[in-house]
Amino acid sequence: MKKILFLIIALFSSATCLYADSGSNEIEQLKEEVRLLKSQFTEMKSSYENKINQLESKIEQFSQPAPAPETKPIQTAQSPQTNLGRYFQNFNPDISVIGDFIYHGTDNKNDAVCNQFQMRQAELAFSASVDPYARADLFLHVEPDGDEWHVGLCEGYMTLLNLPIENLQGKVGKFKANFGKVNRLHLHSLPWVDYPNMLTNYFGEEGMSEPGLSASYLIPNPWNQYAELTFEVMNNHNSASFAGSPGRDMVYLGHLKNFFDLNEESTLELGTSLATGPNDDGHGKNRTTLEGIDLTYKWRPLKEGLYKSVIFQNEVLFSQKDNVVYEEGADPKQVNSWGAYSSLQYQFAKRWSAFGRYDFSEFPDYANRHDNAYSTGLTFAQSEYCFWRLQFKHTDRDYAKDSNEVWLQCNFGLGPHRKHEY
Amino acid sequence: MKKIVCIIGLMLFFLPCSYAQEKINILTTTSDLKSIAEFIGGDKVKVDSLARGCQDPHFVEAKPSFMIKAKNADLFIRVGLELEIGYEELIIDGSRNPKIRIGQPGHLDASEGVLLLEVPSAVKIDRSMGDVHPMGNPHYWLDPLNAKIIASNIANRLGEISPQNKDYFRENLAEFNRKIDKKMIEWQEKLNPFKGQEIAIYHRSWPYFVNRFGLGIACELEPKPGIPPSPGHLKEVINIIKQKNIKVILMEVFYDEKPARFVSEQTGVKVVIVPNSVGGTKEAQDYFSLMDMIVDRLAQGLSS
């Protein structure tokens, strides 16, 4: 009997324990839910408070005291045209202006604009989507021409983004030839004050920019690497290497750009270019052929990328120009010449970077004349939209007097200028 | 006969593979969006991001290799509010991928419907104000409630792109929201003791975080957004920190520590360096561990 009683008591006690256990679990669960609800309620409360604050600040804006009645003209109901005006404003292109101011000092007495301040260029840029298939970019340059100013179209082209062939893009208009790296850069986006001698000797003061057509194709490959092949046909107006006068023929140009991520912080770009076109006034059988190789290494650490970077950029160009007459009475012959530059830029602080560049360049018409130039400088980026640059350049010439030049540049931009390519 | 059975067996074995669905390729601009997209998309998606967590997301360069990533993407997700203004257009144009152009289903602005702060109220804003974002402060992912909205935007868009997996994405979204709710209790409990306290910051990345957890911002080390600290401005910062007895300078991993250390030497304020994006440090592996880290380090800094 005792045993039975004992068993019953034991059963009861364990039952209550079990009950208590499940009860405490339930309480814990309920507590958890209450905490969850409490936190959700606090979230909701703060989100509504935020919304109310936003609305209040808007009401405040709208209820600011109106100007005195005597100064306020009688207002009529807004005409639909005004609304329409605002509506059309959305379709205005992005407009930006870039000013490039320099002081250029030189000991070269033949330089017409030496030792003077100069507003070297003002660039007006317009860009927008044309329609779902294309975008357009226009760059107008206002430049001094003696005491006058002239406005010119540096580039103006439409890019066809959605062509029926996959990976293909087209470009029509006037644009900078896709030869090497530096020819495509505008004056204000150069990492130096001046273009390398190689470019000015073979393409003219501001490079080669002509009306034409361009097609570029991203070459699919099993390694998923960036490989872009560009083919361009342009008017034969460039006088430095080509005919330089209107004719029925064209300059044909090809460029292959390969890009490799060495790791997350450094990249290598290897490009090859080829351009060919007639070079004689009669646009006949005399041709110029140019070959170029460009190699650019960039390093920017991920974490300290705002403060440190290195760009090592190199280009070499070979030219074969037919039937050049060296001297009067001499037989015309082909001139094989070349030019190159090598540049190193090192950013050592958020706003500061230093650079050095070495130029070697012959001339398309004279392989027996050459320039050797050594440049060095310092750039201070006041902000993303304004920089100051000091550059010194010494040029050794074997056909004329050597020269020393110094520039102080201030470049400033207004508006949403489209970012430059990597 | 055996051969035939073998061949049929092999065919049946490979049949499910050929029917197996390909994953949706997602390319996000930041690693935070990547983390949230991975949670929502689960095993139906493959996600990559352009910026790494230890990078300043304002200054990502438009590398051609990013164009290849964008070329292969089915969905491109951006933070928006002009955070990616320096590279997004170049990458999308260069990718030649019409699916991810703005306005297409393959392009998602994660900021749709988020609670925005610091939308400039001035009629005209200009660059004398520094790098002001005209549509509002873009660092909204640092508010966990906004993370829920981002997740919902991603789930909706993934559901549109892959309707057969809509329910799967909705379930993952519900799970994400549940996890955020649960974590919010933990985070709030840790920061509740400091409610109402003000902190100093380097850049205006933190208003959303500070607003959510009831803290305040006393001053910034940058005189204006994006403008590096100047000695004159640091003097003002030192005065404010002394006057208001500020205990912490909260800053991101990619900014120069020297100005903050200088202020710390002058005032005794503690410098708390945390990532503001997933992957900014090894510990911040996903959105939740990122927030864990920010909350823990800030709480430690404030309590000391």
Image (cartoon, rainbow, N blue to C red):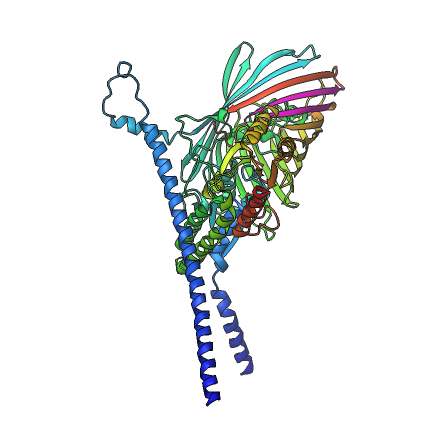
Which quarter of the image is occupied by the C terminus of chain A? top right
Q: Position of residue A346 (x, y in %)?
A: 68, 32
Instruction: Name the one closer to the observer, B228 or A369.
Output: B228
Q: Position of residue A289 (x, y in %)?
A: 64, 32
Give the residue displayed 45% in from the left and 66% down from the top.
A25
Question: In this view of the protein, can residue B98 be seen by the observer?
Answer: no
**Is A378 colored magenta in this rendering?**
yes
Q: Is residue A193 above or below residue B106?
A: above
The outermost residue toward the bottom is A1
Q: Position of residue A397 (x, y in %)?
A: 74, 19
Instruction: Name the one closer to the observer, A255 or B12.
Output: B12
Question: In this view of the protein, can residue A278 be seen by the observer?
Answer: yes
**Is A374 colored magenta in this rendering?**
yes
Instruction: Name the one closer to the observer, A92 or A63.
Output: A63
Instruction: Name the one closer to the observer, B126 or B78.
Output: B126
Which secondary structure type mostly characterizes the magenta part of the structure?
A: strand
Give the residue displayed 76% in from the left and 19% down from the top.
A398
Give the residue displayed 60% in from the left and 38% down from the top.
A255
Q: What segment is highlighted magenta in the picture?
A: A372-397
Displayed quadrant of residue A281 = top right
